[in-house]
Image: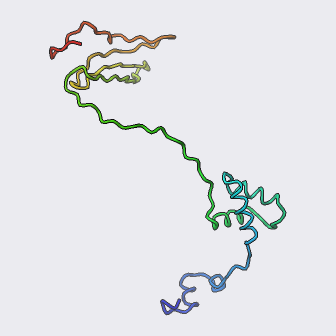
């Protein structure tokens, strides 16, 4: 208040809060609850405030513990459940090899769509990564027990650029 040279009455009137609310200072003592909550949290680090609250209510050393009070003290202590981070597979990233000629690397892909008639279409394609030419393309028929690829078997086909597979 002194920084703005305004009286307490004027500042509270502008903020529309009662002066008694501005002057209020809590008289509650949560020291016993803090110590017990901290001890339980150290003993059981995987427990959140809800499970610690249940343990506090079972223990009769601290009276008047409701969940809101337990949450307030839990946050004031800076406690939180430690999350277990999943261990991820670490891969050594190698640079992609530079392609200098056709047939060094092929890419395959399945594309799937549904026609307006409701028939499902699945397309299998094989592409040469160097020339970006589609080497084989076919539709896949889904049978009851096996899959067959029609049109993808082109062993004797000659490519348009003179290279053969």
Give the residue drawn at x 24%, y 19%: 103
103 lies above or below 23:
above
Q: Is residue 153 left or right of residue 57?
A: left
Q: Nearer the viewer, residue 17 or 149?
A: 149
Q: Nearer the viewer, residue 24 or 85?
A: 85
Q: Is residue 71 left or right of residue 111?
A: right
Q: Is residue 154 left or right of residue 87?
A: left
- Total labels: the figure holds 0
Q: Nearer the viewer, residue 66 or 8?
A: 66
27 lies above or below 139:
below
Q: Specify the farthest residue to the top.
A: 156
The location of residue 67, given as percent across then percent down, is 73, 61
The location of residue 92, given as percent across then percent down, is 39, 37
Give the residue drawn at x 64%, y 85%: 23
110 lies above or below 42:
above
The location of residue 2, given as percent across then percent down, is 51, 91
80 lies above or below 17:
above
């Amino acid at each position: 208040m002194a920084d703005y040279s305004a009286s307490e009455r004027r500042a509270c009137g502008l903020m529309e809060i009662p002066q008694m609310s501005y002057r209020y200072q809590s008289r509650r003592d949560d020291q016993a609850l803090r110590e017990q909550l901290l001890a339980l949290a150290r003993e059981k680090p995987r427990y959140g405030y809800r499970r610690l609250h249940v343990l506090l209510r079972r223990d009769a050393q601290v009276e008047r513990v409701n969940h809101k009070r337990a949450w307030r003290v839990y946050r004031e202590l800076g406690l939180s459940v430690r999350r277990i981070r999943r261990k991820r597979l670490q891969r050594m990233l190698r640079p992609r090899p530079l392609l200098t000629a056709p047939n060094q690397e092929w890419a395959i892909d399945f594309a799937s769509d549904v026609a307006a008639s409701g028939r499902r279409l699945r397309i299998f394609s094989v592409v040469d990564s160097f020339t970006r030419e589609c080497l084989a393309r076919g539709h896949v028929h889904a049978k009851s027990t096996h899959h067959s690829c029609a049109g993808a078997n082109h062993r004797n086909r000659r490519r348009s650029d003179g290279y053969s597979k």
